[in-house]
Amino acid sequence: MLRLDRRAAVMGLGAAAFGITSLAGAIAAPSYDDPDDMYGALRRQPGQILRVGAGTINLVFADGAPGLDRDRVVSWVRTAVAAVTAYFGRYPVKDYGLLVIAEPGDHVGHATTFGYAGTATRIHVGVAADATAFHRDWVLVHEMVHTALPNLPRRALWLQEGNATYVEPIARALVGELPVEEVWRESILGMPKGTPKADDPGMDGTRAWGRLYWGGATFWLLADIAIYQDSGGRYSLRNALQRINRESGGNTVEWSPEQLMAVGDMAAGTRSLQDLYVRFAEQPIDTDLSDLFRQLGVGMDAQGGTRFDDRAPLAELRRRITKP
């Protein structure tokens, strides 16, 4: 299933990077834009098998990915696996194909995750990416989070993109790849982009970039709070998402949003997700984000740094969200 990417830019490809010395009659390397080409490459090209818990990752360097530091890429993949495993309690799927496509540049580029012929991701990586670029990358964890939930109908794309947007920085913080302060700084800066405009309908069916990613992320933060409050502090969203992952097996199956919410609520014995989903899906919800972050005890100082108030009503939940 095609994914939009919340922060990635389109990367330009230079002919010289692929050894093309003459533009006349030159044939560029495969782009793998067609997902069937991606699946074909994962089946036919040599791969490196990485063991992840009870499952495997088939890591394939597309056409040999000339210029990429393979050891560095493998280390980056293992770190992403550790982050997603820390959040979900296990790696979300048993078999995962990862096609790494080399391109010019010094950072990780755009990626897309699919499930219709097996869980797989294609991701573009700059040949000049160094250790810092891989450490700062969020894209691979974002895509791996997508594998944990079942595929939903197009009208509910905001639930999928919002979930990956919300969970990714938390997962990275759980393994020390992102400071906790940065998790909340991203939320403070990002979530206002998901605020509905005056004439916006409910979230179901939205195509607006900010609402898909950050409006969806706001929903999942509110879900975390609702489950915590409705269960008397016994459960959190992580429990619900783990239950959904175990019941569904990941993104190779098709569920409705209603089924996803009902299964998630079973983890805590509440209706937190079902009730919140109906509200967001059917009508525009303008969340008072300033008050929300005040209750969580998080804000920003004049220099743009993150500050915490451990006396805030939801400070305990805030600490729990990023606690390993």
Image (cartoon, rainbow, N blue to C red):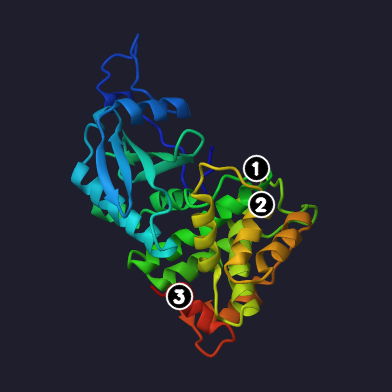
Return the disc, 3 or 1, that comes first in the chain's sequence: 1
For the residues labelled 1 and 2, say whether their Cβ atoms are less than 8 Å apart.
yes
**SS category of the residue bearing label 2:** helix
Kindly identify which residue carries mark 1. 153
Kindly identify which residue carries mark 3. 303
- As shown in the figure, which amino acid type bears the numbered disc 3? Gln
Horizontal side of 291 relative to 46 (left or right) equals right
Return the disc, 2 or 3, that comes first in the chain's sequence: 2
| Whether residue 159 is situated above or below residue 171 in the rendered picture | above
Q: Position of residue 49 (x, y in %)?
A: 26, 41
Which quadrant would residue 23 be assigned to in this image? top left
Kindly identify which residue carries mark 2. 257
- As shown in the figure, which amino acid type bears the numbered disc 2? Pro
For the residues labelled 2 and 3, say whether their Cβ atoms are less than 8 Å apart.
no
| Whether residue 86 is situated above or below residue 206 in the rendered picture | below
Q: CA distance from mark 1 to mark 2?
A: 8 Å
Which quadrant would residue 291 be assigned to in this image? bottom right
Q: Which label number is shown at residue 221?
A: none
Residue 128 can be seen in this image: no
Q: Nearer the viewer, residue 251 or 125?
A: 251
* Circle 2 crowding by C-alpha within 10 Å: few under 14, some 14–19, many from 20: many
Q: CA distance from mark 3 to mark 1?
A: 42 Å
- Measuring 50% from the left and 55% from the top, which residue is drawn there? 245
